[in-house]
Amino acid sequence: MLKLAALKMASSFPGPVKNANTIRLALRSWPEVDEYLNICKGVIIPIGSIEQHGPTGAIGTDAMTAEAVALEVGRLTGVLVTPTQVFGMAEHHLAFSGTMSLQPATLLAVVHDLVISLARHGFERIFLINGHGGNIATTKAAFAQAYCSATNLGLPVAEKLRCKLSNWFMAESVFREARELYGDREGQHATPSEISVTLYLEPSLRSKQKPLSEPPPAGPIHGPEDFRRRHPDGRMGSDPYLAQAEHGALLLEKAALALSKDLQNFLNSV
Ligand code: NI
């Protein structure tokens, strides 16, 4: 758990909460959401993916990590967190069992519809906390579509609506820490940093850890079969055996602090 004093809150923030459940949209009633909107127009949507993470990593890694970072950012800032959009664009992982993917056009429609739903109620700042690189291009396209729709639908917030995608694993402090801990063994997929966060969050995953052979270097990504040919066990240049729960706690803390500042700037932006 982070020290609340570590963050200086802007006046537009509701502020840190003691009970983390109070920032979960799913646990609020609609009159409470109306009350919240009188104080803050910001909301966080965690977005992940359900896809293979190498021979030892959990299929739900990207959804678990995005949700954990989002709930911690919510706890630090008081900004509401919606339920997690657990399914993402993972077409290139479909040659591995367990992967469940939305096509880019489907994900675009889902993110668009979620943004427009929230905008209709008066939310003006939609902050997506993302755990999966494959979601980035599609999510940004969805934002462009949502801006058009908000105007076309004549929503009162259309002029003020802003959407932002923040990738926890790309925060500078997280990236730097991962490089220090793992060097070039961090790789690009099924990375020890993301696996560390899952080991911290879910102790039952720790027993899956085992030494792995030298991974093939990260390369270009095409279709699912091509991905499996190039990366037979699903890893891209990574050594998830280096992952540790203690690292996960540290990385989660760094991600939550960095993204809370990012969110603060976003809420204060014009
Ligand atoms: Ni991942």
Image: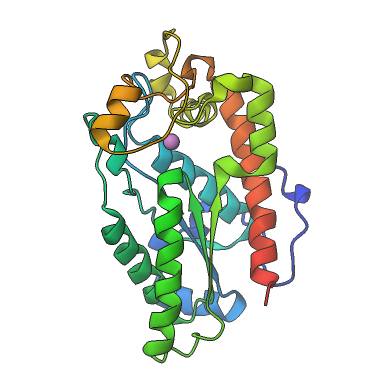
Residue shown at the point (46%, 30%) measured from the top left? 198
Q: Which of 95 and 80 is in front in this view?
A: 95
Q: Measured from the top left, where is residue 67 in percent x and y?
A: 46, 47
Q: Measured from the top left, where is residue 2 in percent x and y?
A: 67, 41
Q: Nearer the viewer, residue 206 or 75?
A: 206
Q: Measured from the top left, where is residue 12 in percent x and y?
A: 69, 72
Residue 132: tell me if it is visible: no
Residue shown at the point (69%, 24%) measured from the top left? 180
- Rendered position, 54 above or below 72: above
The part of the image, by quadrant, that contains residue 214 is top left
Q: Measured from the top left, where is residue 255 in percent x and y?
A: 62, 42
The part of the image, by quadrant, that contains residue 262 is bottom right
Quadrant position of the N terminus in the picture: top right
Rendered-image quarter of ligand 1: top left
Q: In the rendered view, does 221 fall on the left or right side of 98? A: right
Residue shown at the point (41%, 51%) measured from the top left? 135
